[in-house]
Amino acid sequence: MMKVEWFTYDKDDGIKLPEWARSFAIGQDGTVFVPGAISNVSEHEVFLCSCFDGTPHVIFKNHKFFPLKWLSEEFPKSKEICAIIEQRADEVKEHS
């Protein structure tokens, strides 16, 4: 089991996303994990693709999270939100 540290964005006014959808993880090796749901396909489909590719995943609040770089390459519709999360993750890494 990969050890990760979880981070959650604060709720913005008017945005009603659950905690898991506002979260990301950073692994010990610096890998950023994001929710599979941002891919614009079902989490299950993302999971099956990750299994086929041998890509790791982590689970938070019963949702699967996948490496940001892999997800943005395999599911291009997620590129924009992945870039935003990557920027936030980089800020977290700088302050650690």
Image: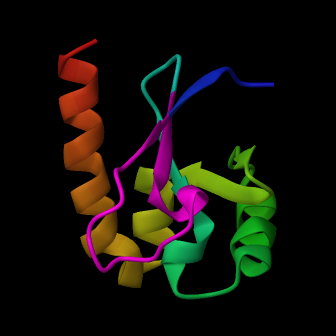
Looking at the rendered image, the quarter that the C terminus falls into is top left
The outermost residue toward the top is: 96
Give the side of residue 14 with respect to residue 57, left or right. left
Which residue corresponds to the image point at 73% horizontal and 60% vertical from the top-left? 63
In percent of the image, x 60 and y 25: which residue is there? Answer: 4
19 up-or-down from 24: above or below = below
Looking at the image, residue 96 sits to the left or right of residue 3; the answer is left
Residue 5 painted magenta: no
Location of residue 77 by image quarter:
bottom left
Q: Name the image quarter holding residue 30.
A: top left
In magenta, the rendered stretch is 7-26
- The residue lying toward the viewer, choosing from 68 and 18, is 18
In this picture, is 11 found above or below 24? below
Left or right side of 8 for 18? right
Q: In this view, does 7 lie above or below 83?
A: above
Magenta residue check for 9: yes
**In the orientation shown, which residue stands out farthest toward the front?**
13
What residue do we see at 59% from left, 74% from top? 37
Q: Residue 94 in the image: x percent, y percent?
A: 18, 19
Q: Which of 14 and 95 is in front in this view?
A: 14
Colour style of the rendered protein structure: rainbow
Which quadrant, please, contains the N terminus? top right
- The number of numbered discs placed on residues in the rendered structure image is 0
Where does residue 36 sit, x and y in percent of width and height?
60, 67
Residue at image position (71%, 47%) is 60
Q: Position of residue 56 (x, y in %)?
A: 70, 44
